[in-house]
Amino acid sequence: MPRVIFLPNDSLCPEGAVIETRPGESVCEAALRHGIEIEHACEMSCACTTCHIYVREGYDSLEPADDLEEDFLDKAWGVDPDSRLSCQVIPEDGDLVVEIPKYTINMVSERH
């Protein structure tokens, strides 16, 4: 099974983490199952940007982002070429190294 290696994040996983994913499981689902509380305001329906991550290694092994995910990534804080929404990333062909951004934009709780 593919592993997801989380780089250290001060609030969500200060030591970093290495977790295994289940077949068909998104990075967000796997993280939550292992106690890494990635924000997911839309309940993983690809309707917000709160689960934004950077895929630092293994990006090329992923299916490309679809148009809906790309549209939401345009609204995310701190987007770079490695950005994806963790609710849409399903590791299949290898391990991933991911970084959780320090900040996120929650359109609901921030009343935008």
Image (tube, rainbow, N blue to C red):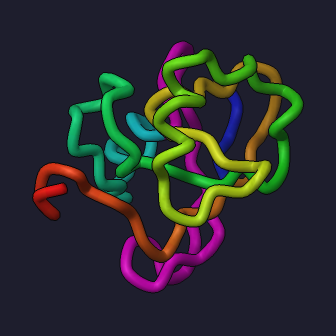
Residue drawn at the location 49% of the way across and 62% of the way down: 77
Lateral position of residue 18 relative to residue 2, left or right: left
Prevailing secondary structure of the magenta residues = loop
Residue at image coords 23%, 35%: 42
User: Residue 93 sits in which quadrant?
Assistant: top right
For the point 84% across and 27% down, which residue is it?
A: 61
Residue 102 image point, x, y percent: 48, 76
Q: Which residue sits at x=43%, y=40%?
A: 28
Q: Nearer the viewer, residue 32 or 108?
A: 108
Residue 54 magenta-highlighted: no
Viewer-side residue, 89 vs 33 = 89
Residue 95 percent coordinates (x, y)? 77, 39
Instruction: Pinpoint residue 33: horizontal percent, then vertical percent.
Output: 33, 42
Note whether 67 is above or below 102 in the view shown.
above
> Quadrant of the image for the C terminus?
bottom left
Name the spot of residue 106 as percent of width and height, x first. 25, 56
Q: Decide whether residue 26 is among the magenta residues.
A: yes
Depth check: give the residue in front, 64 or 17. Answer: 64
Residue 11 lies, with reference to residue 68, above or below; the image says below
Q: Say which quadrant the N terminus sits in.
A: top right
Q: Which contiguous range is marked in magenta?
A: 7-27
